[in-house]
Each structure stands twice: as structure tokens, then as C-alpha cells.
Amino acid sequence: MAEFAFERKEAYVTMITSDDFLPGVEALLESLRESQLIIPEIMRRVVLVMVTSNVSQRVRGKIIRSGASIVEIDSIGIPINRRNSESMNSHLPVPVSHVQSWEATGYSKLNLWSLGSELLGSWEALVYIDADAVVLEELSPIFRRISLENPLVAAPDVFPPDKFNAGVLGVYLEPDQRTFKDMLSQIDTLETYDGGSMFSSFQSFDLIIITTTSDSHPKYLYTTKQATLVF
């Protein structure tokens, strides 16, 4: 129903690459459900869960019964050269992540930019939320900031190197998957700014950073190609 309530197709998205993350996904789905109760039913957006092949049918069934839709995606691993980059002079590779399974799935979040294809639903605007988060407020304002002119909306990170946190993203999608293909083509060459799972192909975006002036949180300002949003 939600897809007919807007001028474009919008959805919330999260991802699970291991059965171990089911409790987090279930908590997030429940928080999204509760946060949307304050708006008319016709305005409530659907929730998509990207799953990789190693997520069991048992877990998929629980996700569907929670009211979300499953989207099958391919695992995108962290490149071998990046996994070994911290080994320095050692003959033994040093894992880039403290979670071993992430080495085979660490870049899978990039599949977000494939969801604009007709095969995967022709989505036009998404708000992605990591499965280790819960939603405390209704998030429609984030969707209003996503557009062709502002294709990536993010919140600041609280840890150096002070770029942005990829745990919550607003994403504008193209039906031809141009951005997705471009990022995949550079996956072995672009540096990661934080040594983690999301790499610097984001440098091609005009990034809108959502900041806060709340007394309980520091205020972050970034120089970007687009104006910084402060609220």
C-alpha cells in the first residue's frame, strides 16, 4: 500500500548476513513498526530486509512473519588486498574486521544501490538502518531530504576520522544502477577512510550531513559540495 501513497517508491531497508543477527533485525523491525503508528496507514512505508545466501530459511520465515519483505542479494566481500593491508611485514594476513564473517560480506551494504533496478523493485528512495539500531522517532523527515540533487544523506560519526556513519543512510536510486556499477568497478582501488567496511567511493557524492544542535550531543559541521543541514 505504501508505494502508492507517495510520488515515488520509498522504503526502509536493513540487512542480515548471518542468522546470529536475527535478534537485532527483529528489534529494529518492531521499532520501525511502532514509530510509524503515529502516521496514517496509507503513509507507512514498507520495510525491506536484504539477505545473503547463508541466512537460513528459518530466519527468513521469522523476518517475513514480522511484516518485512525479503530481498535476496549477493555477498560482497572485503577485497583480499585490503584484508592483508594491515599485516605489514608479517607473513600472516591480519583480518580487517574483528568479526570473521564480515570479511566475506563486509561490502554487501553496497547492494542498496542495486535496489533501483526493475528486478529488485524499482525503488527510488531508501532509508537504510543497520540491524544493531532501533528507531525512536518517525523518520519521514529523512526521506524529504533525499533527491536527485542530494543522493546521499547521512549522520556524522562520533569517532575520528569524523566523516559520517554508514549505519543510517538516505539513498536516492537510479533505475540503471549506474552508481552501483561505478562503486563495484572501484572496489579494489579506492581507499577506505576508516579501515572498515564502507570505502571512499562515497567521495563521488554531494553529501548532505545531518547534524544536531542538541545540548546532549556535540555539533558537527562539515565542508561538503552541498550545504550542511542543521536541525
Image (tube, rainbow, N blue to C red):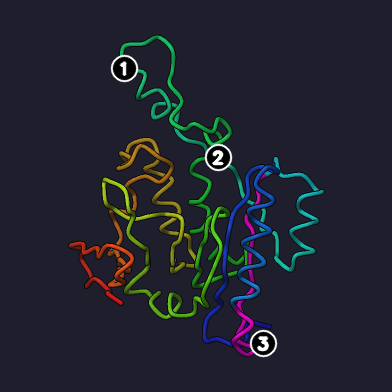
Q: Quadrant of residue 214?
A: bottom left
227 horizontally vs 120: left or right: left
Question: Residue 109, percent across and down?
Answer: 51, 51
Measure how far apart labels 3 and 1 are at the Cα level. Answer: 55 Å
Question: Residue 28, percent across and down?
Answer: 61, 62
Specify the label residue 41 is tagged with: 3
Q: Residue at x 44, y 67 (%)?
A: 170
Q: Residue at x 78, y 57 (%)?
A: 62
Dot 2: what SS? Answer: helix
- Toward the top, the furthest residue is 91
Q: Amino acid at mark 3?
A: Glu
- Foreground: 3 or 229? 229
Q: Amino acid at mark 2?
A: Thr
Magenta range: 36-52
Q: Earlier in the sequence, mark 2 or mark 1?
A: 1
Q: Callout 2: 10 Å neighbours few (<14), some, many (20+)?
A: some
Question: Residue 26, percent across and down?
Answer: 68, 58
Q: Is residue 138 above or below residue 224?
A: below
- Toward the left, the furthest residue is 223
Q: Is residue 92 above or below residue 40?
A: above
Circle 1 sits on which residue? 88
Q: Quadrant of residue 69?
A: bottom right
Q: Residue at x 27, y 74 (%)?
A: 230
Q: Amino acid at mark 1?
A: Met
